[in-house]
Amino acid sequence: MMASVTEIAGLADWLTNTINYEIIKGNAIWRFGLVLLIVLATMVTGRIIQFAVKSYAGRRAQKKGEGPLTLLLKALANPIYAGVFATGIFFAKVPLHFSDETGIRTTISTGWTTLARVILAIAAAYGLYRLVDVIEYYLNRLVGKTETTLDDMLVPIVRKALRLTIAIIAVLLISENILGTNVKSLLLSAGVGGIAVALAAKDTIANFFGSITIFADRPFQMGEIVKIGEHRGPVEEVGFRSTRIRTPEGHLVTIPNNVIVTSSIENIGRRPFIRRTSNITITYDSGHTKAKRAVEIIKEVLAGVPEVNTDGEKPPRVYFSDFNEWSLNIYMSYWVKPADFWLYHKVNEQVNLEIMKRFEAEQIEFAFPSQTLYVKKD
């Protein structure tokens, strides 16, 4: 038990002597208090500046809306605080003596300076990271002037790419110029591994170039109804890896972009008309007169619907086309404009009801599959 007390007392003496020699020797206690005071004052100053910038930006946004200056102030509020804090950390070491003989080791001074430089570099990188919001503002104004809606999806992709690029460059610069890491050697040693990763990620790379092809070729716009393979529906999102389509059943289908650029794309949303083709059958008992009258009635009905296109290029087509096994066939074709899917169904309903009404008035009967058997008696 006495040995244990002696060992504890010896350890305490060793720690005291070590602290006195490594840290406190050559520096009075008040110097450390001054260091703490500088750090706290810097934090308070940074918070005040941050609050002032955010408050001014908020008031400006309420009066004049989200303009470039407002976005700039909001973007730089947090980086300014980080920069002020880094400056305070750097100057906080000024009251201390750094010397291997009479004060704190010089290696601690070097590490202290390095820490302040890293924080300041991170603040600068964070400022550039947030300035992407201002670039996004101008890009949104630019794409707002174009007719295509595909550019609207390009803006968030560019924003993400810029931010990722800034983050990677910042890490590399801080590692090499401040921390002294040999980044070139690391990148060179990672070359072989990068080849393996590239081979493993060949589909991802193919999807990336597929997205570039989509944005360059613009085979469709956002919201347009397209048919790609067996999938049909409006386009909801186009990303660097895939494109999302909402099917009529409500399902969200994700299609890789490399599949899209190698597939035929049927852009249903760009059709100027929606065409309907139908065969109307009447009974053989109708005869020549009623068959001719049925054709006239259908032409009159189509002429009375304003949504049915009557231009010279695509007028309605109605013909007594064929003798079926059990009916007389009248071919009907017309184009509905504008190319609205639900308007198309509404027009079809209107045409169908009017034809039925007119046929009933003229006593023209619709045919249905049937057979007549003639039995000969001996």
Image (cartoon, rainbow, N blue to C red):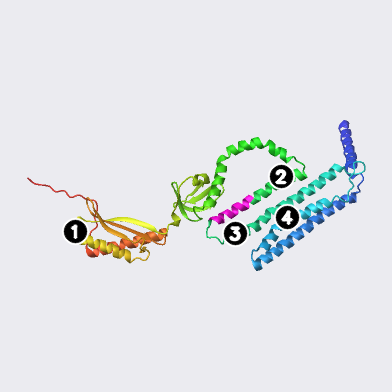
Instruction: Measure how far apart labels 3 and 2 are at the Cα level.
Output: 30 Å
Residue in the picture at 71% in, 63% down? 55
Q: Which residue is tagged 3?
A: 140
Q: Which residue is mark 2?
A: 172
Q: Report, in whole angstroms, how far the alpha carbon at label 4 lies from the one at label 1.
A: 88 Å
Q: Residues within 10 Å of mark 1 (few under 14, many from 20)?
A: few
Rendered location of residue 327, percent (x, y):
23, 53
**Which one is nearer the viewer's eye here, 306 or 272?**
272
For mark 2, does the 10 Å Cα neighbourhood hold few (<14), some (14 to 19), or many (20 or more) residues? some
Which mark's residue is nearer the viewer, 4 or 1? 1
Q: Residue at x 18, y 57 (%)?
A: 285
3 or 2: tag closer to the N-terminus: 3
Distance of mark 4 from mark 3, alpha carbons? 24 Å
| Residue type at the position of mark 4 | Pro
Q: Which badge, 4 or 2, comes first in the chain's sequence?
A: 4
Q: Is residue 136 above or below residue 60?
A: above
Q: Which residue is mark 1?
A: 287
Q: CA distance from mark 2 to mark 1?
A: 88 Å
Q: Amino acid at mark 1?
A: Gly
* Closer to viewer: mark 4 or mark 3: 3
Q: Earlier in the sequence, mark 4 or mark 3?
A: 4
